[in-house]
Amino acid sequence: MAGKLKYALGAVVVAVAAAAAVFVAGGASAAPESTFVLLDGSKKTTADLKGKVTLVNFWATSCVTCVAEMPKMVATYNKYHGQGYQHMAVAMSYDPPSYVVNYAETRKLPFQVAIDNTGKVAKAWGEVQLTPTSYVVNKKGEIVKRYVGEPDFAELHKLIEKLLAET
């Protein structure tokens, strides 16, 4: 029994390490095929992200860290939007849509806000359960960085600048 447990734990450690290595080693992976349903009812797909540097930010109105980081997300968007940067804020499936709409309107969020009513988008992006979780996607539509928790914004800005400079 102890041998099986050690084997199972070892397999989990290897799987977690392999997944982490994708992001740490800089090995970009294609962003998953997803359809984002925006607050106005329109839809965007992963294919629509290509050609721009995008931050896909999973968040919730009930998440204290998400709410605290949102002004920095807005400032980042405002700083880089004119250079080809976009932001997709994806509200989690458990977040009441009326709360999301109210938050986006009262804070005048300048970027696209989607509601993941079914949880399909969070599932496609790696079974996202912790908020905030953010993915930086390059112009080719590849995930180049994942942040769980509030990003180091100085580091994020350097990465955005580097990716915006790429052709």
Image (spheres, rainbow, N blue to C red):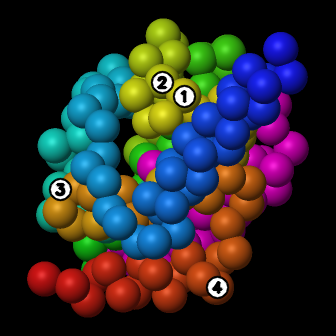
Compare residues 26 and 72 and report the one nearer the observer: 26
Question: Which disc, if any, is residue 167?
Answer: none
- As helix, strand or loop, the secondary structure at mark 1 comes to loop
**Residue span colored magenta:** 56-82
Question: Which disc, if any, is residue 154?
Answer: 4
Task: Decide which of tag 4 and tag 3 comes sooner along the chain.
Answer: 3
Q: Quadrant of the N terminus?
A: top right
Give the x, y percent position of residue 10: 69, 39
Mark yes or no: residue 102 visible.
no
The residue pinned by badge 2 equals 123
Give the vertical position of 77 relative to 159 (above or below).
above
- As helix, strand or loop, the secondary structure at mark 4 comes to helix
- Looking at the rendered structure, the kind of residue marked 4 is Ala
SS assignment for the magenta stretch, majority: helix
Q: Residue at x 41, y 72 (%)?
A: 26
Compare residues 40 and 92 and report the one nearer the observer: 92
Task: Decide which of tag 4 and tag 2 comes sooner along the chain.
Answer: 2
The residue pinned by badge 1 equals 127
Q: Residue at x 68, y 20 (%)?
A: 95
Mark in front: 3 vs 1: 1
- Looking at the rendered structure, the kind of residue marked 3 is Lys
Give the x, y percent position of residue 23: 48, 62
The residue pinned by badge 3 equals 50
Q: Residue at x 78, y 32 (%)?
A: 6
Label 2 vs label 1: CA separation?
A: 4 Å
Mark in front: 1 vs 4: 1
**Residue 166 lies in what quarter of the image?**
bottom left
Label 4 vs label 3: CA separation?
A: 24 Å
Give the x, y percent position of residue 164: 29, 81
Task: Decide which of tag 3 and tag 1 comes sooner along the chain.
Answer: 3
